[in-house]
Amino acid sequence: MDPFRPRAAFLLLALVAASFTLLGWAPKADRFTWFMENVPVILGVPFLVATHRRFPLSPLLQVLLALHALVLMVGGHWTYAEVPAGFWVKDWLHLARNPYDRLGHLFQGFVPVLLFREVLHRKGVLRPGPWSVAVLLLMVLGLSAAYELLEWLTAVATGAKADAFLGTQGDPWDTQWDMACALIGASLALATLSRVHDRQLSKLGLGGAK
């Protein structure tokens, strides 16, 4: 039996495709904001499909990438500051702002760090250990910083049109919070899933930790 369970991978792809169609059909956000929030999905999913046979990812990572795509698509549909579930959490915890964007940035660290880990370990670029953890966390911070720079460039180029994409909700420390959430997410992923990830890679013969 194929260890990558192609039927399960196909179901994940179908779920992402159906969600993309449903949430993108008539988004509450303007179309520009919807597009900017969905760029990682629009570019990432076709790339993963194209490279699946040559470089199939572990089932754990496939599931996490699908979940991350759903988080991005929900944020793109409503804009992160207007996601209804975020308002429920805001009221429940008596927060000053809709926290859905914090969840988005936690995922921005939680999932990419395992993607970086899998690719670099399988390619032999990194070996499991403290240096690997440090490099992976710095890579996530670099990714988060690059995304913040993209938001800044978009705001400079389009002015007020980018307000919904920025989603700062009046917080002057929003950029710092975003990067901190990505770092927390990456740290949590490495602390909780590294052993599971390694066992899965080893079981599949993909070069997990020995």
Image (tube, rainbow, N blue to C red):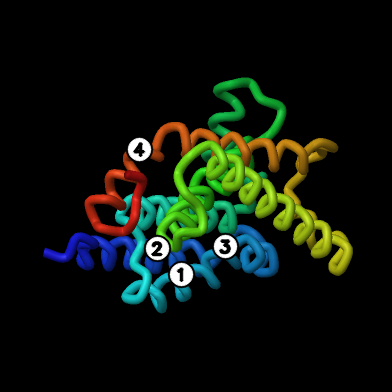
Tell me which amino acid carries mark 3: Pro
Q: Which mark is residue 195?
A: 4
Tell me which amino acid carries mark 4: Arg
Q: Which quadrant holds residue 95? A: top right
Q: Is residue 159 above or below residue 97?
A: below
Q: Position of residue 47 (x, y in %)?
A: 47, 74
Image marks 1 and 4: residues in contact by CB distance under 8 Å? no
Q: Which quadrant holds residue 162? A: bottom right
Q: Which mark is residue 45?
A: 1
Which badge, 1 or 4, is on the more N-terminal residue? 1
Q: Position of residue 33 (x, y in %)?
A: 68, 63
Spatial CA span between label 1 and label 2? 9 Å
Tell me which amino acid carries mark 2: Val
Spatial CA span between label 3 and label 1? 20 Å
Q: Secondary structure at mark 2?
A: helix
Q: Which residue is mark 3?
A: 27
Q: Quadrant of the N terminus?
A: bottom left
Q: Position of residue 72 (x, y in %)?
A: 54, 55
Spatial CA span between label 4 and label 2? 27 Å
